[in-house]
Amino acid sequence: MKNPQCPKCENQKVVKSGFSGGRQRYKCKKCNYYFSVNKIGKSIDKYYVVKALQLYIEGISYREIERILGVSHVSVMNWVKQYKIKAPENTDYRPTYKVLNHKELINFMSDKANLTDTGMLITELGDKFMVIKWERFKN
């Protein structure tokens, strides 16, 4: 197998330097950086990353996002840092949300009381829909 390049300085001159955790370890000859390849771990589908960030922007807390999507709140915090997402400015409101199937969503939208004096966002969650509501101009 061809030696990989250094992830720090991208130099091609690396030498094998033993094993760490059952994986081959390398040392860069230019910057003396030690590294391994073939990172062990699972990746989360980008769909959930986008949904988690959308929910965060709408003012839903990390723990609530964890309960809704089934993704660790720590992962959500890391994505917020990674993509440099700013926290919502207005903390005077607390959004409420409901997860509905298609038939329930139609019934919800047909009731005029659900559509007045509120802001609302509807987003897809797999085969269901999430309605996020917050009341406007209320003290």
Image (cartoon, rainbow, N blue to C red):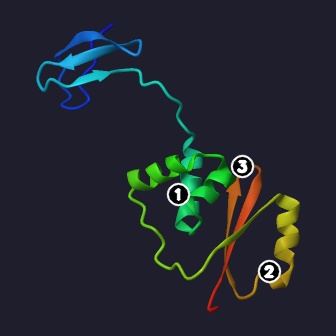
- Whole-angstrom CA distance, mark 2 to mark 1, is 25 Å
In percent of the image, x 42 and y 66: which residue is there?
Answer: 86
Quarter of the figure with the N terminus:
top left
Mark 2–mark 3 distance (CA, rounded to whole Å): 23 Å
Is 51 rendered above or below residue 90? above
Q: Is residue 23 left or right of residue 45?
A: left
For the residue carrying disc 1, how many other residues have a C-alpha within 10 Å: few (<14), some (14-19), or many (20+)? some
Amino acid at pointer 1: Leu
Q: Nearer the viewer, residue 83 or 20?
A: 20
Q: Secondary structure at mark 2?
A: helix
Res. 126 mark: 3
Q: Callout 1: helix, strand or loop? A: helix
Question: Residues under labels 3 and 1: Cα distance?
Answer: 16 Å
Q: Earlier in the sequence, mark 2 or mark 3?
A: 2
Give the amino acid at mark 2: Asn
- State the SS at label 3: loop
| Viewer-closest of 109 and 19 | 19
Find residue 62 and report its horizontal and vertical position in percent.
56, 58
Task: Tell me the residue that label 2 is attached to.
Answer: 114
Q: Earlier in the sequence, mark 3 or mark 1?
A: 1
Residue 14 drawn at (x, y percent) = 19, 16
Which image quadrant for residue 63? bottom right
Question: Dot 2: within a 10 Å radius of its alpha carbon, few (fewer than 14), some, or many (20 or more) residues?
Answer: few
Q: Which quadrant does the C terminus fall into?
A: bottom right
Which residue bears the numbered disc 1? 53
Tell me: 63 left or right of 39.
right
Going by the numbered disc 3, the residue's amino acid type is: Gly
Question: Sequence-wise, which precedes: disc 2 or disc 1?
Answer: 1
Tell me what residue is drawn at x 41 percent, y 21 percent.
38
